[in-house]
């Protein structure tokens, strides 16, 4: 397996233009058959996906992943984002990098948690660049739907106190594997502080946008979700399954799994389900 890393600079026009984003690529020794662009979740970073990358590379895929603005080794303020579009800008430039390296290969988008929301939001305008998409525990609906009052307060705080910490995540909801939780808490590149008001409001706004425009998404879609996910409501995956217009779509709920299904004890089963489905999409394209 080959590995390389580098930095991307957000282009002029981005709300965080000039910011440096760290990215990584894992690829097989032989020519890969397709590209997986991985979009990680809130507070974490691309380095947590080495097991994911090893599996996908063994199946013949090249994997590209970045650290979002404000995450991991990238520029930015943890728990904050000036505008949700900054996350989409980073994904777009990573896809451009992947296509530069492998111009003839199809791109498969895989988004986890907030990365699932980023991916779904990206598809509303950019699905022509993507051959198929997998969403893992996407944050499309909150585990507990916020009230109208809370949304109004969130909007006020976002405008006037954008970096004020308003939401803490329960790390015990990440995985049933105690080692995964311990490693998560000990990882210096994982942010364990509160989510700021601006990012919280931006997430809520983009959840609403994806829900209202889900019918515009028409590419092949695989939705994977842990049935006992306490951090991102399984209702979000069910909603997408019911409302996207894709003729090729599949929803798979793992009844006992927590939020990070790629880090659960059953991770090999989940990863095989994902790459088997991606292989099917490639076979259909080649038919």
Image (cartoon, helix red, strand yellow):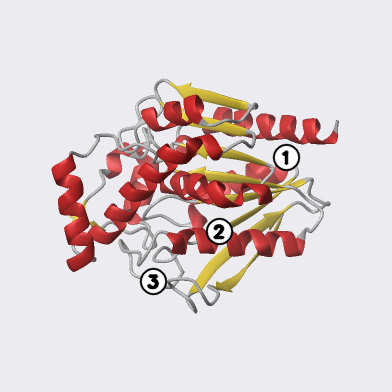
Residue 189 can be seen, yes or no: yes
Label at residue 91: 2
Label at residue 231: none
Please tell me in which quadrant of the rendered image residue 59 appears.
Answer: top right
Residue 266 can be seen, yes or no: no
Q: Which numbered disc, 1 or 2, marks the residue closer to the eye?
A: 2
Residue sitting nearer the eye, 160 or 75: 160
> Measured from the top left, where is residue 205 in percent x and y?
33, 49
Q: Which numbered disc, 3 or 1, marks the residue closer to the eye?
A: 3
Q: Which residue is mark 3?
A: 76
Q: Does 242 sit left or right of 51 as displayed? A: left
State the CA–CA distance, disc 3 to disc 2.
16 Å
Q: Which numbered disc, 3 or 2, marks the residue closer to the eye?
A: 2
Residue sitting nearer the eye, 25 or 146: 146
> Measured from the top left, where is residue 229 in percent x and y?
35, 31
Q: Which residue is mark 1?
A: 59
Residue shown at 17%/60% (left/top)? Answer: 157
State the CA–CA distance, disc 3 to disc 1.
34 Å
Residue sitting nearer the eye, 220 or 68: 220
First reached walking from the N terminus: tag 3 or tag 1: 1
Is label 1 in contact with label 2 (beta carbons under 8 Å)?
no
Disc 2 residue crowd, few under 14, some 14–19, many 20+, Cα 10 Å: many
Q: Secondary structure at mark 2?
A: helix
Q: Does 202 sit left or right of 215 as displayed? A: left
State the CA–CA distance, disc 1 to disc 2.
23 Å
Please tell me in which quadrant of the rendered image residue 163 appears.
Answer: bottom left
Residue shown at 52%/24% (left/top)? Answer: 251
């Amino acid at each position: 397996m080959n590995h390389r890393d580098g930095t991307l600079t957000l282009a002029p026009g981005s709300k965080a233009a000039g910011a440096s984003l760290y990215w990584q690529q894992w690829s097989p020794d032989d020519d890969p058959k397709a590209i997986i662009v991985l979009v990680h979740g809130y507070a974490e970073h691309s380095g947590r996906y080495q097991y994911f990358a090893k599996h996908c590379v063994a199946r013949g895929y090249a994997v590209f992943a970045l650290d979002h603005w404000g995450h991991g080794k990238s520029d930015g303020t943890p728990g904050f984002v000036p505008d949700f579009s900054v996350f989409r800008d980073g994904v777009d430039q990573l896809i451009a990098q992947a296509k530069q390296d492998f111009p003839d290969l199809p791109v498969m988008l895989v988004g986890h948690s907030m990365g699932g929301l980023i991916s779904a939001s990206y598809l509303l305008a950019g699905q022509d660049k993507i051959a198929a998409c997998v969403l893992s525990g996407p944050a499309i609906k909150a585990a507990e739907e916020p009230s109208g009052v809370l949304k109004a307060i969130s909007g006020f705080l976002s405008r006037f106190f954008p970096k004020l910490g308003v939401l803490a995540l329960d790390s015990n909801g990440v995985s049933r594997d105690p080692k995964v939780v311990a490693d998560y808490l000990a990882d210096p590149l994982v942010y364990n502080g509160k989510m700021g008001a601006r990012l919280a409001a931006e997430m809520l706004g983009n959840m609403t946008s994806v829900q209202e425009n889900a019918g515009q998404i028409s590419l092949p879609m695989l939705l994977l979700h842990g049935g006992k996910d306490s951090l991102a409501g399984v209702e979000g995956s069910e909603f997408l399954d019911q409302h996207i217009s894709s003729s090729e779509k599949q929803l798979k709920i793992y009844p006992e799994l927590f939020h990070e299904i790629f880090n659960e004890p059953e991770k090999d089963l989940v990863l095989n389900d994902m790459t088997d489905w991606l292989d099917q999409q490639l076979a259909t394209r080649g038919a």
